[in-house]
Image: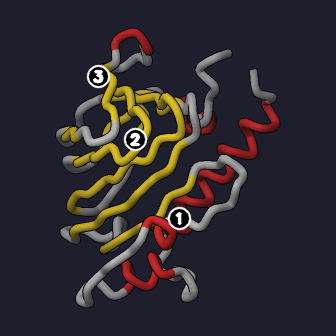
């Protein structure tokens, strides 16, 4: 079991990462940020350019193209999630296309998180969650997912009390 302090640190890292990723003032020295800021130009990123290794096991999110905050704009982002990461039931304002790059992303449908009612989506899997579809997920092993859709991106938790507790250890 992980300490609540660890969960708070990871939660704040995730929220800060989301804010940074959705921010128009992306870091100039980040190759992925440069690509996202200049969509009309070709984008070619190696895995090392997508995520800079922080070595702390925190959630990382990088916008690869477009602007998730803008309406009617195609965007793509990658998220790296630690082992046993749980995403409570939520939905999005537009169709969400998910490709599992590595690890296993276990996905389920409904208003209540139930680990036993998920489908294991190993690396190479693909899913589409229609606009408004209530779904949840958890990871096995460090997992990288890639999401693409037409903006704006958003995430509404089915149970609003889940929002501040976004990061949970499912082994508790």
For label 3, the SS is strand
Lower position in the chain sequence, tag 3 or tag 2: 3
Point out which mark residue 109 bears: 3
Depth check, mark 3 against mark 2: the one in front is 3
What is the quadrant of the N terminus in the image?
Answer: top right
State the SS at label 1.
loop
Q: Residue at x 19, y 41 (%)?
A: 128
128 vs 146: above or below:
above
| Distance between mark 1 and mark 2 Cα atoms | 26 Å
Q: Which is nearer the N-term, disc 1 or disc 2?
A: 1
- The residue shown at (34%, 53%) is 146
Image-based side of 23 in relation to 54, left or right: left
The residue closer to the viewer here, 70 or 118, is 118
Q: Position of residue 83 (x, y in %)?
A: 57, 33
In the image, residue 11 lies at what x, y percent? 65, 44
Residue identifier under label 1: 51
| Mark 2 Cα shell of 10 Å, populated few (<14), some (14-19), many (≥20) | some
Name the image colouring: secondary structure
x, y percentage for residue 78?
A: 41, 57
For marks 3 and 1 on the same chain, the one whose residue lies earlier in the sequence:
1
Residue at which label 2 appears: 156
Element under disc 2: strand
Side (left or right) of 23 relative to 71? right
Q: Nearer the viewer, mark 1 or mark 2?
A: 1
């Amino acid at each position: 079991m992980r300490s609540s302090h660890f969960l708070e640190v990871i939660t704040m890292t995730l929220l800060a990462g989301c804010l940074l990723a959705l921010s128009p003032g992306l870091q100039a020295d980040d190759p992925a940020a440069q690509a996202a800021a200049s969509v009309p130009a070709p984008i070619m990123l190696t895995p090392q350019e997508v995520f800079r290794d922080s070595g702390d096991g925190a959630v990382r999110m990088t916008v690869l193209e477009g602007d998730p905050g803008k309406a009617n704009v195609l965007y793509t982002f990658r998220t790296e999630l630690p082992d046993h990461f749980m995403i409570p039931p939520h939905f999005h304002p537009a169709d969400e296309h998910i490709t599992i790059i590595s690890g296993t992303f276990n996905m389920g449908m409904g208003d209540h998180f139930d680990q036993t009612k998920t489908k294991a989506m190993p690396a190479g899997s693909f899913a589409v969650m229609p606009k408004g579809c209530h779904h949840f997920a958890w990871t096995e092993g460090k997992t990288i997912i890639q999401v693409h859709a037409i903006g704006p991106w958003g995430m509404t938790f089915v149970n609003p009390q889940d929002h501040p507790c976004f990061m949970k250890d499912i082994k508790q």
